[in-house]
Image (tube, coloured by chain):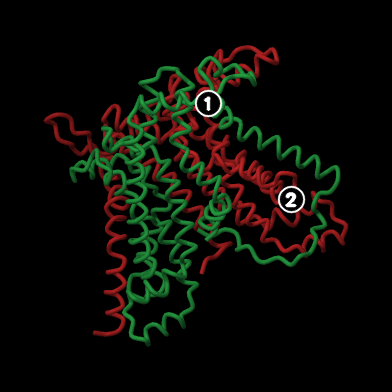
Chain colours: A green, B red
Amino acid sequence: MSAAPRPVAVATHSDPYAPRGLSLTLESAGAILLALIWVLPLAYAVWAAIHPAEYTTRFVLTAPLTLDNFTRAWAAAPFARYFLNTFILVTMILACQLVLGTLAAYALARQDFWGRDVAFALILAQLMIMPDALIVENYRTLSRLGLIDTIPAIALPYIASAFGIFLLRQTFKTVPKELDDAARVEGASPLQVLMKVYVPLAKPTYIAYGLVSVSYHWNNFLWPLLVTNSVESRPLTVGLQVFSSSDQGIDWAVICAATLMTSAPLLIGFLLFQRQFVQSFMRAGIK
Amino acid sequence: MTNRATATIHGWLLLLPAMACLALFTHWPAVASLVESFYSTPRGRRPARFVGAENYQQMLADPIFWKAMSNNLWFALGTIPTSIALALLMAVWVNDKIVGRTWVRMAFFTPTILPMIAVANIWLFFFTPQYGLLEQIIHAFGGRNTNWLGSQDTALYAVTVVAIWKEAGFFMIFYLAALQAIPLNLGEAAAIEGASRWTYFRRVQFPLLMPTTLFVLINAVINAFRMVDHIFVMTRGGPDNATTLLLFYIYQVGFSFWDTAYAATLTCVLLALLAIVAFVQYGFLERRTHYR
């Protein structure tokens, strides 16, 4: 999808509207206040998770620290298996998306052939009709295929991603045609040209799309909930929901620990590679 | 064979894997939903039979459907303007050289990468009556106890707040990118003309952000019909359907009551709503911005 123009290199002028003095102080205070409100739920979850249950709602600085809630959560449900399932799921989806997306994007970007525009329109339809809206029919299709309660069943509706194809098409279009021609003169086949010229040049797009895709499918819930019903296929999000709604009653400390555990890989990744995450989401949206 | 024929074969071979998956999981189910909405749900030995518009008549007479539609409308009206306005405010703040800029930006963006199902658990506790965090804060200021998620008057507001919190930081980054792309000499020119900062924002920055606003708006509208994960954790559509959104109702009808024909009918309504969004986008948005 298109939106804003791409950021351009800005000359080092000073911005006459940059706030100074008192207005800068006020603006900073406002921003920091809103930021504190924004992290409050997460900060609270951390508080509850690292303190004994009796301190869950009592905020005293002398409360003893403990990792007990994490060990109890880990022992109470097969989280190791859920982690493995989610890991397999996001890897499977991303790998398929990249292969299918690269081939389709190459055709759309650099081949001129009969029916191309129709094909592109048909692909873009998925940007509006997201798989979540079609849960009833997709469930029927997958049960006909006999795949219900398997990890591929969670992955299949998502492996052809209009968003990914669109993003890669836009990137491939920026590759200079001369490079393409030069490789062909050297005797490279179309697939070799794709692998040797286009794919390496689109690396930033691949990274951006990969981060967005992994975050999305790590967090996806509704569809995995519907097509899985056993520990062997359930991803983390569904496992967490089963765990917190049935097993634990209202032991908030343990639920908060489990919640943090499921979010931890993405959260740690985000804290370490903040810039890449933000730029990836930005790039993915702007193209 | 001509060159063009070869290119056509190559092109379609490259497209084949992706197109096959899209056809199976997007195009076919959309068409199948439409067809099925004119048939009855097969039950036991009775196969599905053609019933004409009966499912649609049932839908129009279904008070829960109307409840879900109005809930979804209020959810959309609650989330879309607020999250966009907050996103813009956040972007303007983070774009300036404020104190702790990196940390503030990180705080705003963090909800985007957290699983909705996980943060909904935290919010559930936040809203818990008696000893939840919100109750404690209200109590400290001498307020009355409220069962935020258990009352029909407040439950929809509560799930709306969570949705705003989740998506505002995501929209922020698009505004941030667009703000950074505005050439600084526009600001210098405006300053020479003696424009106030508010005038500069209203007359220069905001109009230049229009394509971004439209892009974010389309996303916000789609999200308003897609975000249901937190409903599963926080309210399960209750109390008394006060927080049932359209997609959640489709889930209930299709997978709790197993009335697949009626679920297909509801799916068609959702698809029609999304088609309207697409129509508005292609008629309005695409004419103003272009990608080539």
Residue B65 is situated, as x and y percent measured from the top left of the image, at 40, 30
Which numbered disc covers residue A97?
A: none
Regarding residue B67, the answer to whether it shows in the image is no
In this view of the protein, which residue sits in the foreground, B268 or B175?
Answer: B175
- Name the kind of residue labelled 1 in the image: Ile
Left or right, B41 with reference to A21: left
Question: Callout 1: residue from which chain?
Answer: A
Measured Cα–Cα span from mark 2 to mark 1: 36 Å
* Dot 1 crowding, Cα within 10 Å, few <14, some 14–19, many 20+: many
Residue toward you, A28 or B16 = A28
Point out the residue furthest to the bottom here.
A185
Name above or below for residue B69 compared with residue A11: above
Residue B89 is drawn in which quadrant?
Answer: top right
Q: Name the residue under label 2.
A: B96
In the image: residue A89, left or right of residue A109: left
Q: Give x and y (percent) for residue B2.
A: 27, 85
Residue under pointer 1: A50
In the picture shown, does residue B129 fall above or below B17?
A: above
Q: Are marks 2 and 1 in contact (CB under 8 Å)?
A: no
